[in-house]
Image: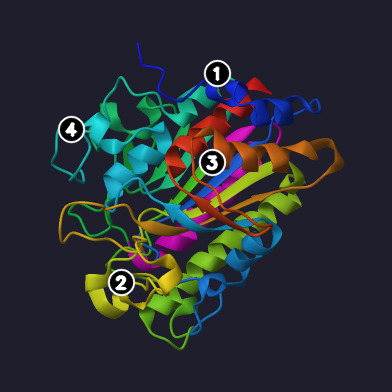
Amino acid sequence: MKTKNLLLGLALTSPIAAKAVKSAPVEKKPNVVIFFIDDMGYSDISCYGQKKWKTPNIDQLAENGIRFTDAYSASPICSPSRAGLLTGRYPARMGIQQVFFPDNYTGIPQKELLIPELLKTAGYTTGIIGKWHLGSREKFLPLQNGFDEYFGIPYSNDMSSQVYLRGNDVVQFHIDQSHMTKKYTEEAISFIDRHKDQPFFLELAHNMMHVPIFCSPEFRGKSGAGLYGDAVLEVDWSIGQVMAELKKQGLLDNTLVIFSSDNGPWLQEGPLGGEAKPCGKERPPATKGASGFRSSLTGKGKSSRAPTMKWFGTSTGFQPWPISAVLLFLTASGSMVTTSRAYCYVERRAQAMCTLTSAIIKT
């Protein structure tokens, strides 16, 4: 039996959160969409200071929602970060401190309880598209860990044996990665269309911006700032397409959308590794001490600051949900908060996410 590590009762033990949840009845459980972008830098997005290209669709999430300026990933590398997001636990406590490779016989421990498993008990349909990276043996794949559907590459796009899986089965052995972002977008739109009449949880985990960098022919040269900028623009386009599908299906006012990088940029890759400004050496004095990019110099303090945003619709029937969602996201996990209307300081992002999941189930 899997251990209950998702802070199941915490949402109701917080006085502020409990009041928010009880303030109005919710007729239909909200959908949840998570955009999880591999290795995207803090300032790769124009609303975080990027000047060489524009990301209007991601910026729209920030404009209509909340932009977190200090959200820390659970780890500076892929597998532990994803384990933290989906379980709400520190990766080291699960024994996940390095990335999983295609020939590994290990993966996320079977005793762990993941967000999709918890949501399924509340009647949600769950899906993940894109990068999994929590073990590629069948018992570690998404369908054995709470997801009803999976399509994507089960590990990083620079590892051997690049294949597409659908569910547990290989459906394509030879992948043209230049079409990968578009393919994932099409799969996400299909998932939303097929499950629009029931509550769903969807994680769209793009392999971009992990090296090697690719983009489709339509985006090559579009940024005027090299291949990396072109690929960022295609990811931004992808977010816009998914949001447009939610709007088309009349789901925008009943969908919680969360956007984040998994762990910040890979600075050693130079122009193909993203940007961490104003973090690192270029951060302003006011943020001194913040860990703004992946660090492997000391083995300590490796938390990575990542661009993170939350958006929720504002229909009359769900007026309390933006409030309760934010309160749960910021307070129920023990996060430290200094907040205005648009700027928040958040730690322990994964724990907060799982507490929010608990509140959705209790609704």
Mark toward the start of the polypeptide (4 vs 3): 4
**Mark 2 residue element:** loop
Indicate the amino acid at tag 2: Gly
Figure check: 356 above or below 267? above
Query: Judging from the image, what secondary structure is the residue with disc 3 in?
Result: strand
| Magenta run includes residue 194 | yes
Residue 124's spot in the image, x, y percent?
Answer: 59, 27
Kind of element beneath mark 4: loop
Pointer 1 local density, CA inside 10 Å: few below 14, some 14–19, many at least 20: few
Residue on which disc 3 sits: 202
Q: Position of residue 162 (x, y in %)?
A: 25, 53
In the rendered structure, which amino acid carries the disc numbered 3? Leu
Vertical side of 149 occupied by 286: above or below: below
Inter-mark Cα distance, 3 to 1: 16 Å
Q: Residue at x 30, y 80 (%)?
A: 271
Give the residues in magenta.
176-202
